[in-house]
Image (cartoon, rainbow, N blue to C red):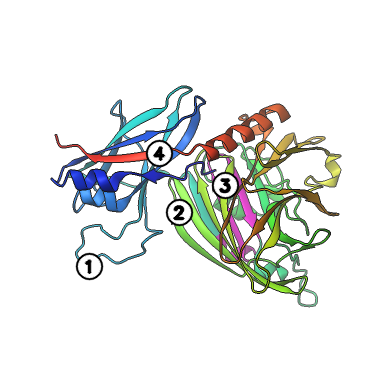
């Protein structure tokens, strides 16, 4: 989950320190007493470039206050510009992470140019289009995985082909027991293997025609109008710290209103929940009510699952804790800060919000499995989701200042 709408006060600071430096100090602060593990620190590259002219992503070092070298990532999500002078001005953001301890409200980091090459760090967040499996799109970080379904899966099966057909814009979960990437390996192993736990985890979640874990639709008070499978995809950043991608959905009918949707996913290492920005485009009504849903029957029928639903209005969240016969227990959750209420239909439990055309709706969706060892009870899952909701409401603030030797 991305709990940090990061405010950067660097512009004024850099203007006041116009002399170029070879080191940059980044200070991250917040106002919670609780721990904030895997907090992603985001520094606009324009501020790095202003303090360290000509800095390049392969000649950079990031250190914490104790001098430990930190894995980092430089994105090009924005401005997606060219760099004709070759000075590194086209990059978007510098990203790295810090584990805030309980009561630690401020942390300081140093960014330095390096004559030596810095090789890429091991990826902890990853996404890709999967053409070898009927246009799936899959993504993961070091704690959880997901996938959703493309046009090829929804296409009719030629006679005698035995092709699987499923039309759904629901979101699937791949439960992991390891912190390394598994998407490529699991697709390589194939369906009959990744639906069993062979040591790394398993695909045991049921999507069907439901919203799965965090799919959306337009709610009219009694009926949920949903899109088909995603139509197009675009990867904007791909680890090691953060992965960003977009999925677009063709227009569908919502009680006479044609609606299109673009989902932007931001997947950070170390987080059970991913940030999603859904932008709905429509003409006519000033606003629509959108629902984000959880499947009411998320486990395989053979598991005789017991599903406990929690509507956490204080934290604007909707949660499940699912006890299974032989596959352990898992939790799913949605955190929707602008939530206006809850609802349900035959397939899904829903949390609702109003949206205007062209204005992104931001929410967080995700899951956890007790056999991964991080979250092993309903109470622990509720506590985790509540803590993440507080992180969302109390973002980290960033200041940047050149620091000459």
Q: Mark 2 highlights which residue?
A: 238
Front one among 51 and 130: 51
When asked about the image quadrant of residue 40, the answer is top left
Label 3 Cα crowd, 10 Å radius (few <14 / some 14-19 / many 20+): many
Q: In the rendering, which numbered label is found on residue 270?
A: none
In the image, residue 299 above or below residue 130:
above
Label 1 Cα crowd, 10 Å radius (few <14 / some 14-19 / many 20+): few
Residue at the far bottom: name it: 159
Tell me if residue 224 is in the magenta stretch: no
- State the CA–CA distance, disc 4 to disc 2: 24 Å
Tell me if residue 131 is in the magenta stretch: yes
Q: Are marks 2 and 3 in contact (CB under 8 Å)?
A: no
Q: From the top left corner, tell me how far across and down residue 386 is, in percent.
A: 63, 33
Quadrant into which the C terminus falls: top left
Q: Mark 3 highlights which residue?
A: 274
Q: Earlier in the sequence, mark 4 or mark 3?
A: 3
- State the CA–CA distance, disc 1 to disc 2: 24 Å
Q: Mark 4 highlights which residue?
A: 397
Q: Secondary structure at mark 2?
A: strand
Looking at the rendering, the stretch of residues picked out in magenta corresponds to: 129-148
Q: Main secondary structure of the magenta part?
A: strand
Q: Are marks 4 and 1 in contact (CB under 8 Å)?
A: no
Which-is-in-front pick, marks 4 and 3? 4
Q: Secondary structure at mark 4?
A: strand
Q: From the top left corner, tell me how far across and down residue 241 is, in percent.
A: 44, 45
Q: From the top left corner, tell me how far across and down residue 397 is, in percent.
A: 40, 39
In the image, residue 247 above or below residue 3:
below
Q: Earlier in the sequence, mark 4 or mark 1?
A: 1
Q: Are marks 1 and 2 in contact (CB under 8 Å)?
A: no
Q: In the rendering, which numbered label is found on residue 84?
A: 1
Q: Earlier in the sequence, mark 1 or mark 2?
A: 1
- State the CA–CA distance, disc 4 to disc 1: 32 Å
């Amino acid at each position: 989950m991305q709990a940090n709408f990061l405010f950067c006060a660097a512009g004024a600071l850099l203007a006041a320190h116009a002399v170029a430096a070879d080191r940059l100090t980044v200070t991250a602060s917040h106002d919670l007493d609780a721990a904030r593990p895997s907090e992603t620190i985001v520094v606009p590259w324009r501020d790095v470039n202003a303090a360290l002219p000509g800095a390049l992503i392969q000649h950079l070092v990031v250190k914490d206050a104790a001098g430990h070298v930190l894995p980092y990532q430089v994105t090009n999500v924005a401005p997606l510009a060219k760099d004709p002078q070759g000075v590194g001005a086209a990059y978007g953001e510098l990203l790295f992470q810090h584990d805030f301890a309980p009561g630690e409200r401020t942390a300081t980091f140093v960014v330095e140019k390096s004559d030596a090459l810095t090789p890429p760090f091991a990826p902890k967040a990853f996404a890709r289009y999967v053409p070898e499996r009927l246009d799936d799109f899959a993504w993961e970080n070091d704690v959880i995985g997901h996938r959703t379904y493309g046009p090829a899966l929804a296409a009719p099966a030629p006679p005698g082909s035995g092709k699987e057909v499923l039309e759904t814009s629901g979101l699937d979960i791949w439960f992991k027991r390891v912190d390394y990437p598994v998407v490529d390996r699991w697709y390589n192993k194939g369906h009959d293997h990744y639906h069993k736990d062979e040591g790394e985890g398993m695909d045991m979640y049921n999507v069907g025609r439901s919203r799965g874990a965090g799919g959306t639709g337009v709610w009219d008070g009694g009926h949920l109008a949903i899109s088909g499978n995603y139509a197009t995809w675009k990867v904007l950043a791909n680890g090691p710290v953060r992965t960003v991608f977009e999925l677009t959905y063709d227009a569908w009918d919502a009680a006479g209103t044609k609606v299109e949707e673009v989902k932007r996913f931001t997947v950070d290492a170390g987080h059970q929940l991913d940030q999603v920005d859904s932008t709905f485009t429509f003409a006519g009504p000033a606003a629509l009510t959108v629902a984000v849903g959880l499947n009411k029957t998320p486990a395989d029928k053979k598991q005789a699952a017991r599903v406990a639903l929690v509507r956490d209005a204080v934290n604007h969240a909707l949660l499940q804790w699912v006890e299974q016969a032989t596959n352990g227990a898992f939790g799913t959750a949605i955190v929707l800060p602008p939530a206006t209420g809850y609802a349900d239909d035959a397939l899904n439990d829903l949390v609702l919000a109003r949206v205007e055309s062209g204005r992104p709706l931001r929410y967080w969706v995700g899951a956890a499995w007790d056999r991964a060892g991080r979250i092993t009870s309903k109470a622990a899952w509720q506590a985790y989701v509540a803590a993440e909701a507080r992180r969302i409401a109390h973002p980290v603030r960033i200041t940047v200042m050149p620091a000459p030797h």
